[in-house]
Amino acid sequence: LLPKPPTQVTMHCEICRKDVQGFNLFCRLCDFIIDISCALKDKLSHRVLGQRVIGTVKGRCMSDKHSMVQVIISNSYQTACAICEERFHGKALSCMMCEEIYHPGCIELTLQPLLRHPLHPAHLLSISLTSGSKCIACKMDMRKYGYRCPE
């Protein structure tokens, strides 16, 4: 928490894109900065903190409704991939509308259906929203995404 921006150069809040004038949260490792008012807003999800947008990506999020952006996740705000649930920092893909963050590799896996899996060799399996279901292999609850037979 800083009382003013760390440099004399005008810095823009990573959330609202307005000039940061007063109190702010700043990461010296990745130059991520947000105005304190944005940090305290009710709508701000913990998944948004620590994301710095570095580019756009061709492709859609897991809901297939929104475009994604490429972000860098600050080491100070590590978060979990929405698909594999592993906590991480560094480069990631993010759907700001769904408030989900994905490993780039996990998104690539969703594009490739599983062929001839020993538990379901007759059909292709693809990753989709499966919350509330149980895995037939290990009987554990699936919290969000899992492999499913579309047929």
Image (tube, rainbow, N blue to C red):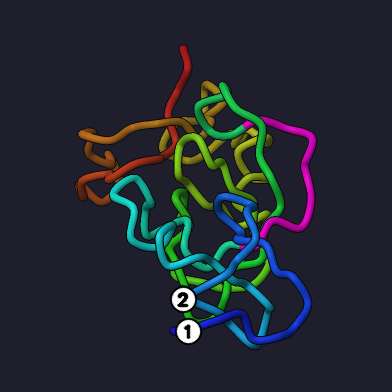
Which of 124 and 109 lies nearest the eye of the viewer?
109
Which of 76 and 34 lies nearest the eye of the viewer?
34
Label whose residue precedes the other's in the sequence (1 or 2) = 1
75 versus 43 height, above or below? below
Q: Are marks 1 and 2 in contact (CB under 8 Å)?
A: yes
Residue at the image position 67 percent from the left and 54 percent from the top: 104
Residue 122 location in percent, x, y?
Answer: 52, 22
Which of 140 and 100 lies nearest the eye of the viewer?
100
Picture quadrant of residue 115: top right
Magenta residue check for 59: yes
Q: CA distance from mark 1 to mark 2?
A: 4 Å
Picture quadrant of residue 11: bottom right
Residue 19 location in percent, x, y?
Answer: 65, 60
The stretch in magenta equals 52-60
Total labels: the figure holds: 2
**To which residue does mark 1 refer?**
3
Amino acid under disc 1:
Pro
Mark 1 residue element: loop
Residue 91 location in percent, x, y?
Answer: 68, 65
Amino acid under disc 2:
Phe
Magenta residue check for 89: no
Q: Which mark is residue 47?
A: none
Residue 138 location in percent, x, y?
Answer: 26, 51
127 versus 85 height, above or below? above
Residue at the image position 54 percent from the left and 42 percent from the top: 96
Which corner quadrant holds the N terminus?
bottom left
Determine the main secondary structure of the stretch shown in magenta: strand
9 versus 115 height, above or below? below
Picture quadrant of residue 37: bottom left
**To which residue does mark 2 refer?**
23
Residue at the image position 23 percent from the left and 33 percent from the top: 133
Residue at the image position 42 percent from the left and 67 percent from the top: 36
